[in-house]
Amino acid sequence: MKVILQADIKGKGKKGQVMDVSDGYARNYLLPRKLAVPADTGNLNILKQQEAAQKAKRDKERSDALEIAERLKSCVIIVPAKAGSEGRLFGSVTSQDISEALSKQHGIEIDRHKITIDENIKQLGTFEIKAKLFADVTATLFVTVKEE
C-alpha cells in the first residue's frame, strides 16, 4: 500500500515522503496513529501544493536575506560602551548589543544568534563581523565601538 508519511519515522522515512509499505503495517500502525495517510490522488495533490508553498516561502526568505545583505554593506553600526584607560572596555560587546544597535540605528532586525563574533570585542575601534542571514547568504557588518 502506498502512503504519505505525516511524521518522521525512524528507519522508514521522513515527513512528506511517499512510501510503499505492507497493508497490515499501514492499516494497523501508521493510519490509526495518524503517522501516514493513503497516497490517493487527493492527498498527492495536497502534498504537491504544500511543497510548492514551502518552496515559495524559502525563495521569499532568501530574497529578503539578500536584500538585507545589500543594505548592510553600506551600514556602519556604532555601539557605545564604557571604556577605561588605553581604550579597553569594561566587559565586552556582545551579539545582543550589536543586534539592538542595528535595530535602533538602521531599522534592520537581525536575530542575535545569526551574528557571529570570532573574538570578543574588548576594546574601542572598528570591527568586521559576519552575520549568517540564510543558508547560503552571509553579510558583513562593520561595527564601530565608541566610548560613552
Image (cartoon, rainbow, N blue to C red):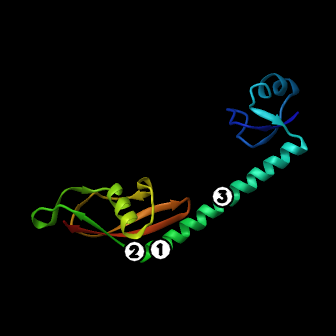
Instruction: Compute the Cα span from label 3 to label 2.
Output: 27 Å
Instruction: Compute the Cα span from label 2 to label 1.
Output: 7 Å
Query: Answer yes or no: do the residues labelled 2 and 1 have beta carbons within 8 Å?
Result: yes
Label 2 SS? loop
Instruction: State left or right for residue 131 relative to residue 145.
Output: right
- Residue 111 coordinates in the image, percent (x, y): 44, 56
Name the residue carrying label 1.
Answer: 71
Name the residue carrying label 2.
Answer: 75
Please give the name of the residue rendered at 39% of the width and 69% of the height, measured from the top-left corner: 141
Using the image, determine if residue 112 lies above or below residue 16. below
- The amino acid type of the residue labelled 2 equals Cys
- The amino acid type of the residue labelled 1 equals Arg
Please give the name of the residue rendered at 9% of the width and 64% of the height, measured from the top-left corner: 85
- The amino acid type of the residue labelled 3 equals Lys
Name the residue carrying label 3.
Answer: 57
Please give the name of the residue rendered at 50% of the width and 61% of the height, measured from the top-left corner: 133
Q: Which mark is residue 79?
A: none
Instruction: Compute the Cα span from label 1 to label 3.
Output: 21 Å
Instruction: State left or right for residue 22 relative to residue 96.
Output: right
Label 3 SS? helix
